[in-house]
Image: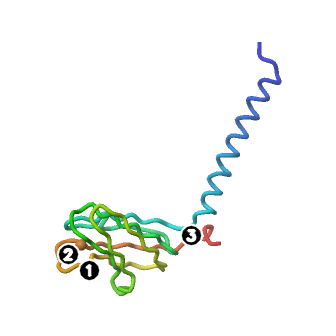
Amino acid sequence: MKSPWMFLRARLLGILTVACVAMAAQMSWAEDPELVLKLYAKEFSIEPSVTNVREGPVRILVINEGTMAHALTIEGREGTLVGVAPGKTAQVTVNLKEGEYVFYCPKRGHREKGMVGRVKVYRKSYNERG
Ligand SMILES: [Cu+2]
């Protein structure tokens, strides 16, 4: 026979678990506001070729799954450049405002062969502003 105390304890544990999960979700949001954009490069494509992120500092990870050296830059912001050897991952953080950007591999001929893509950057929604 279950005592009322056992029942209450089970209820309390349930409520505590839900509260902890909610807090953990909020904390990870607050501690890691940075966005990560993963781009997979190979001969001759960058995937995903169309992608979306929220505006702000965006950490771009370039994963080279090909057999040649590649690089990544953003049209109009060629000062942002990251090279990545075959089988390696490189990263660069860029501060992106709302708009549409073209990224591509600046190695000779690679863009023309398909190593190009677009990222749409959206404004933060009202309740995400901090
Ligand atoms: Cu390339």
- Dot 2 corresponds to which residue? 110
Q: Is mark 2 within 8 Å of ligand 1?
A: yes
Residue 60 is situated, as x and y percent measured from the top left of the image, at 42, 69
Look at the image and tell me in which quarter the N terminus lies.
Answer: top right
Question: What residue type is disc 2 on?
Answer: His
Labelled pair 1, 2 in contact (Cβ < 8 Å):
yes
Foreground tag (3 vs 1): 1
Q: Residues within 10 Å of mark 1 (few under 14, many from 20)?
A: many
**Secondary element at image label 3:** loop
Foreground tag (3 vs 2): 2
* Residue under the point 56% across and 70% down: 125
Labelled pair 3, 1 in contact (Cβ < 8 Å):
no
Horizontally, residue 59 falls left or right of residue 107, namely: right
Residue 94 is situated, as x and y percent measured from the top left of the image, at 46, 77
> On the image, which quarter does residue 91 sit in?
bottom left
Q: Residues within 10 Å of mark 3 (few under 14, many from 20)?
A: few
Lower position in the chain sequence, tag 3 or tag 1: 1
Q: Is residue 67 above or below residue 106?
A: above
- Dot 3 corresponds to which residue? 125
- Dot 1 corresponds to which residue? 106
Which circle marks residue 87 in the picture? Answer: none
Question: What residue type is disc 3 on?
Answer: Ser
Question: What residue type is disc 1 on?
Answer: Pro
Q: Is residue 117 above or below residue 26?
A: below
Labelled pair 3, 2 in contact (Cβ < 8 Å):
no
Horizontally, residue 46 falls left or right of residue 122, namely: left
Residue furthest to the top: 1
Residue 79 is situated, as x and y percent measured from the top left of the image, at 38, 86
